[in-house]
Each structure stands twice: as structure tokens, then as C-alpha cells.
Amino acid sequence: MLLLGAHMAQADLLPDGPGKAATVRVCGKCHSPERAASLHQKRSAWEDTMVKMMKLGAEGTDEEFEAVLSYLSTHFGPDTPGPININKATAVDLETALVLRRSQAKAILDYRAHNGNFKSIDDLRNVPGIDFKKIQAKSSRLEF
């Protein structure tokens, strides 16, 4: 039960919209629901992913699975996401937009919380534990 509670708290990081509750309920039984944010797939690929999850034991009604599919397809489709404001971004935003590991996203959030907003890309050099070259390669997507 404690694990599910942790997943529910992490679900606050997901975008609001129809199907979010079903996604948290169905996907959150086995893993953190924001894990889906690391994938950006076409609807057909999401269908394949969901079939795989059902074979692994995911449980839900047909209506819940359709809501999850619609939610994931809408919010985590293949389109390239827009710019990300590094000073307002959540951990999930950083993981997906910059293709960072969870630990690196957390390091950025922790650094920002202790040192204030970033003013330029160069400020990110000071964040311990991140791959600055990886972030620098995505600098065109960053806003400050």
C-alpha cells in the first residue's frame, strides 16, 4: 500500500486530462505512472505496449484501458515536445524533454531549490551528477 501511495504522489507530475485517473489506477499498480512519460509513441505503439502490459498482468476494464490508451496517445505521442522552462520544469518534464535519468532530473531540481533559478545554460554546469554535454546538445529546447 505504501508503494501505491508513492505512485499516487508521483502522479501529480503527470499532465491533467481525461484518462489520467485511469492511467494512475491501472499503471500505478505495477510501476510509477509517470514512467510512461519516458516513451513518446504513436497510438499503435501504445496499443502494443498496453497488450504487453496486460499479458504481464495489468488489470482494468475495457473502458479503463481505452481511457489509458487515449491519455497516453494524447500526452505522450511521437510529436516533438515544445520548449521547456528549466526553472519551472518538473522531474518528469526534464526526464522526457532532455532524455535524462531520474537521478539527473532530481539533481537539477535539488540544485534549483537550493540555489535559485538558472539564468543561462552555463549555470547548469554547476549541477553535480549531470551530463552537461547531453543538456547542452538540447539547449535549443531550453527556456530560462
Image (spheres, helix red, strand yellow):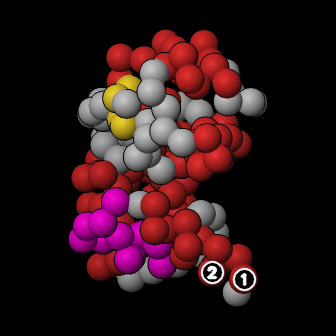
Residue 17 shown in magenta? yes
Secondary structure category for the residue under label 2: helix
Left or right: 48 as drawn, with respect to 10:
left
Residue 63: quadrant of the picture: bottom left
Q: Residue furthest front?
A: 115
**Residue in the picture at 42% in, 17% down:** 139
Amino acid type at image mark 2 = Gly
Height in image: 97 above or below 60? above
Label 2 to label 1: alpha-carbon separation:
5 Å
Residue 65: quadrant of the picture: bottom left
Find disc 2 in the rendering and name its residue. 5
Q: From the top left corner, tell me how far across and down residue 120 is, in percent.
A: 45, 21
**Residue in the picture at 44% in, 36% down:** 86
Image marks 2 and 1: residues in contact by CB distance under 8 Å? yes
Residue 118 shown in magenta? no
Q: Which residues are magenta?
A: 15-26
Find disc 1 in the rendering and name its residue. 2
Q: From the top left corner, tell me how far across and down residue 8 is, in percent.
A: 54, 75
